[in-house]
Image (spheres, grey):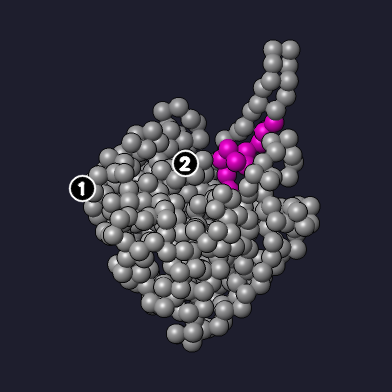
Amino acid sequence: MELNLAVLPGDGIGPDVVAEGLRVLQAVCKRYGHTAHLTYRKVGGASIDEFGEPLPAEVLEMCRQQDAVFFGAVGGPKWDDPRSKLDPQQGILGLRRGLDLFANLRPVKVYAMLIDSSPVKPEVLQGTDLVIVRELTGGLYFGRPRRRWTTSRGRRAVDTMRYTEQEIRRLLKVGFDLARTRRRKLCCVDKHNVLETSRLWFEIAEEVAQEYPEVQLEHLLVDNFAMSLIRRPSTFDVVVTENTFGDILTDEAAVLAGSLGMMPSASLGTKKTRKGTFGLYEPIHGSAPDIAGQNKANPIATILSAAMMLRYSFGLEREAQAVEGAILQALTEGYRTADIFQPGTRLVSTTQMGEAIANYT
């Protein structure tokens, strides 16, 4: 099979980890007789520096012509001016909106050999294997009005959280379909005791649940879920929530996995490829400019994102499992980057971890 990919390494450690994700992808393609065609472009801060904008129209259009997008990270102190109208984050937000990628799947799996990397008690972490499905194109990040102004009483600002029934329903269906293939449990997280948008989420979840009688539906307020995610993570299977809540909760969930460097993601829409669904694949961590170019970053989240790409956009389940198995073997053999290092294991660089996983693929 030919795999046509847009590659957007971005800023900071983005190029470091994307290089290792592609190393492993090429290894699995060679093993199983596939060919990956890679089209590289700049995005985020790197694009601002060269083109004066975080997401040129040409880059967005190129991405539309591919089977999937492989993305690193954007941002850094160089572009952190709140007065500027140009923000590297507009690159990823523009990609999600421009490619109509509304469902962000973020798996949270605790590996037995990394259980001591988390500050959470091992007995609490045992058996944790869940997926958070985050809405990507609505809510506070995109709602209008959104502005700042000054009055005689001082400065003011407003952001707007808005959602439509169609946006909520299509995301819930992704969550219910996923739960149907797993442990058949779905938790809808909102703030329906305060927010009108959350009351709409609650109502539509109840309606969609009627189409999935085999899936058990649970509702939790976001503050209660934030606590329960740490106290009883193994009880959750699929979790569905809106954009802002999902952004925050998945970073919290990284504590369970031991590091943001272990957290992949897939952003999916409705567009179909020859064997699956068009998507954008990226680690959930940021650009970590303090270690950029130092060969210290953990590439596993990016490599796991490549496995998700093989599964969801190309229908290559055997190949995806080969990548996941190679990661498990590398961890079992004691390979550790600094973020997950424990005494008695082998401290390795970004490239050494990528090489080990590629060799086990």
In this orientation, does residue 226 appear?
yes
Neighbourhood count class around disc 2 (C-alpha, 10 Å): few under 14, some 14–19, many 20 upward: few
Residue at (50% x, 35% y) in the render: 197
Q: Which residue is mark 1?
A: 123
Q: Is residue 157 magenta?
A: no
* Residue 294, position as x, y percentages in the image: 55, 58
* Residue 44, position as x, y percentages in the image: 67, 53
- Mostly what secondary structure, the magenta segment? loop
* Residue 204, position as x, y percentages in the image: 44, 43
Residue 246 in the figure: left or right of residue 209? right
Q: Is residue 240 above or below residue 309?
A: above
Amino acid type of the residue that numbered disc 2 sits on in the rendered structure: Ile
Residue that extends furthest to the top in the rendered view of this protein? 153
Q: Which residue is mark 2?
A: 248
Q: Is residue 160 above or below residue 49?
A: above
Amino acid type of the residue that numbered disc 1 sits on in the rendered structure: Glu
Residue at (49% x, 68% y) in the render: 351
In this orientation, does residue 96 appear?
no
Q: Is residue 144 magenta?
A: yes
Residue 37 in the figure: left or right of residue 52? left
Seen from the viewer's position, the closer of residues 255 and 184 is 255
Q: CA distance from mark 2 to mark 1?
A: 24 Å
Seen from the viewer's position, the closer of residues 343 and 215 is 343
Residue that extends furthest to the left in the rendered view of this protein? 123
Neighbourhood count class around disc 1 (C-alpha, 10 Å): few under 14, some 14–19, many 20 upward: few
Residue interval drawn in magenta: 137-147
Q: Secondary structure at mark 1?
A: helix
